[in-house]
Image (spheres, helix red, strand yellow):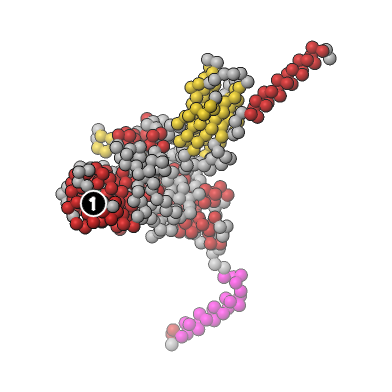
């Protein structure tokens, strides 16, 4: 009885409103609050996803058999010294391919935060210090590092040769079984298959990508449905925040290194030299693109490896990280010292100029954002994630 | 007007025309500005109007002069004056012919105003030229 009466009241009310006409009941109008230059800058941060291009330095890049073989290796702890650490220990799919820890632990404790492997195939440099110049070369490091998997080329070659399944897969991919008399070559081939697998890890389209494409197509109505707080955040990101100078392009990184005012002491008296040490390691590595393991030196040019400059400013610089899918990959920064995206935004808002390199670039300044602006910039960063 | 002055005028007009043609002949790209008085013209060509970030770049540089001088110690760099930083890579320089060079592996890692800087020695002096380019 009550229900019916309430329904009929509603009905009458609705009828009156309809009679009064649409002029009275207006929904909030979706609109684009960004203009000219900022729209132009936003368009340069897409489209997404990028087209897949094979890695010319890796002859099994893009091969389905190699992807399968690589996936198995990526998940398998039996390759590690004590049989309990695999790549997936520190790169978990459910944590956006990082591990949720401040700093990672394998056989023993590392000093850095695990990086996400989303879209990793698009990098120019690998590692927070850019110590390697290809995905396959980077995949060798954790296998040999005493603190990570602690194994050796010999142990890898014999593990693959002795396991019937691995041996079969290896032969399918490379046309011959693992040759234990050349363990280094077997290890590099294993790393190239692991790289082929990691090339398949691509993040999805996000609310930002729909916004960006709508702007590119001139569809302002569709663009206007992108939330207003994210739009206000974008105005800071592409404007006074200067964020897009470093976090640029579809990946939201220019692939280079910078000093974002984080400390680089690992413990009293010991520093993480960041990019400086990375360049030294790169030059010393037999696995860089100038070396004999590059499968196609004509196409996979080593210009960056030959020409990278060891400036003093590289000391304590770290990779400018991509900003996609960050909602899955907390905590943040090279040492994992900032727990939330809000913490990161507050860091930029209050950045300590004393901590920035005196001879570095003068781009970052304390932004002194209001609480509303902090919330808006966080909303923008969240819109770069698919969930 | 005295004959002497007329001759001088014609001569200087000729000289002007010659030096103008030297300018037109110097390279195919953007003219660079000298930092101080010089008898040289320099142009840089980055393969088109649009130079962009995110791709390694090659720049052809032509150095022209009316004197038959061979320059040496050629250098090219690019910096962002507003941010006080340069490139993270050292360009590779190749000599392509008399007073012509190609610098490759330049990488402009940020949008904004970049200043290309060229220097070389000739006549016992260092000559410096620059050109600002807005990069998107």
Total numbered circles: 1
The residue marked by circle 1 belongs to what chain?
A: A
In the picture, measured across the screen, residue A166 lies left or right of residue A32, that is left
- The residue under the point 69% across, 23% down is B18
Residue A18 is situated, as x and y percent measured from the top left of the image, at 58, 76
Instruction: Please indicate, yes or no, whether residue B40 appears anywhere in the rendered image.
Output: yes
Where does label 1 land, which residue?
Answer: A177
In the picture, measured across the screen, residue A278 lies left or right of residue A4, that is left
Farthest residue, direction left? A82
Farthest residue, direction front? A176
Please say whether residue A55 is one of the residues in the magenta stretch. no
- Given residues A42 and B61, the one toward you in this image is B61
Residue B39 is situated, as x and y percent measured from the top left of the image, at 61, 20
- Given residues B5 and A386, the one toward you in this image is B5
Q: In this view, does A271 lie above or below A88?
A: above
- The residue under the point 34% across, 42% down is A294
Instruction: Please indicate, yes or no, whether residue A201 appears anywhere in the rendered image.
Output: no
The region drawn magenta spans A4-25
Q: In which quarter of the image is residue A289?
A: top left
Q: Is residue A308 above or below residue A142?
A: above
Residue B21 is situated, as x and y percent measured from the top left of the image, at 67, 26
Q: In this view, does B31 lie above or below A146?
A: above
- The residue under the point 46% across, 48% down is A249
- The residue under the point 49% across, 44% down is A240
Residue A165 is situated, as x and y percent measured from the top left of the image, at 21, 58
Q: Quadrant of residue A283?
A: top left
In the picture, measured across the screen, residue A366 lies left or right of residue A140, that is right
């Amino acid at each position: 009885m009550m229900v019916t009466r309430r329904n009929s009241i509603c009905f009458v009310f609705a009828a009156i409103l309809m009679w009064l006409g649409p002029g009275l009941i207006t929904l909030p109008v979706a609109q684009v609050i960004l203009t000219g230059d900022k729209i132009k800058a936003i368009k340069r941060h897409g489209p997404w996803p990028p087209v897949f291009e094979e890695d010319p330095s890796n002859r099994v890049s893009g091969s389905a058999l190699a992807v399968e073989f690589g996936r198995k290796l990526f998940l398998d702890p039996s390759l590690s010294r004590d049989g309990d650490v695999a790549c997936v220990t520190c790169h978990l799919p459910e944590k956006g391919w990082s591990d949720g820890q401040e700093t990672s632990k394998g056989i023993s404790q590392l000093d850095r935060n695990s990086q996400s492997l989303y879209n990793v195939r698009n990098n120019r440099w690998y590692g927070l210090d850019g110590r390697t110049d290809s995905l396959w070369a980077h995949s060798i490091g954790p296998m040999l590092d005493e603190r990570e998997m602690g194994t050796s080329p010999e142990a890898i070659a014999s593990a693959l040769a002795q396991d019937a399944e691995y041996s079969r897969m290896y032969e399918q991919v490379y046309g011959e079984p693992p040759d234990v008399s050349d363990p280094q070559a077997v290890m590099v081939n294993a790393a190239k298959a692991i790289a082929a697998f990691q090339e398949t890890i691509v993040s999805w389209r996000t609310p930002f990508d729909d916004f960006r494409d709508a702007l590119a197509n001139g569809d302002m109505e569709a663009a206007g449905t992108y939330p207003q707080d994210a739009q206000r955040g974008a105005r800071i990101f592409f404007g006074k925040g200067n964020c897009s100078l470093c976090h640029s392009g579809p990946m939201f990184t220019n692939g280079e290194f910078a000093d974002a005012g984080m400390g680089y002491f690992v413990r009293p008296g010991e520093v993480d030299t960041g990019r400086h040490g990375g360049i030294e390691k790169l030059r010393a590595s037999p696995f860089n693109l100038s070396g004999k393991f590059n499968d196609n030196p004509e196409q996979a040019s080593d210009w960056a490896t030959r020409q990278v400059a060891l400036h003093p400013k590289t000391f304590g610089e770290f990779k400018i990280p991509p900003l996609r899918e960050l909602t899955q990959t907390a905590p943040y920064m090279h040492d994992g010292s900032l727990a939330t995206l809000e913490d990161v935004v507050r860091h930029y808002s209050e950045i300590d100029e004393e901590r920035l390199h005196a001879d570095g670039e003068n781009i970052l300044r304390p932004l002194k954002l209001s609480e509303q602006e902090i919330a808006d910039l966080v909303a923008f960063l969240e819109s770069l994630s698919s969930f | 007007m005295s004959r002497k002055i007329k001759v001088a005028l014609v001569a200087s007009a000729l000289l002007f025309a010659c030096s103008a043609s030297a300018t037109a002949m110097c390279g195919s790209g953007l003219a660079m500005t000298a930092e101080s008085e010089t008898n040289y013209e320099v142009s840089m060509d980055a393969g088109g109007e649009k130079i962009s970030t995110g791709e390694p770049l090659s720049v052809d540089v032509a150095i022209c002069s009316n004197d038959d001088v061979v320059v040496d110690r050629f250098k090219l760099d690019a910096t962002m004056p507003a941010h006080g930083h340069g490139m993270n890579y050292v360009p590779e320089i190749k000599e392509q012919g008399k007073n012509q060079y190609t610098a490759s592996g330049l990488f402009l890692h940020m949008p904004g105003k970049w200043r290309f800087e060229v220097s070389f020695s000739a006549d016992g002096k260092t000559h410096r030229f620059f050109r600002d380019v807005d990069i998107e």
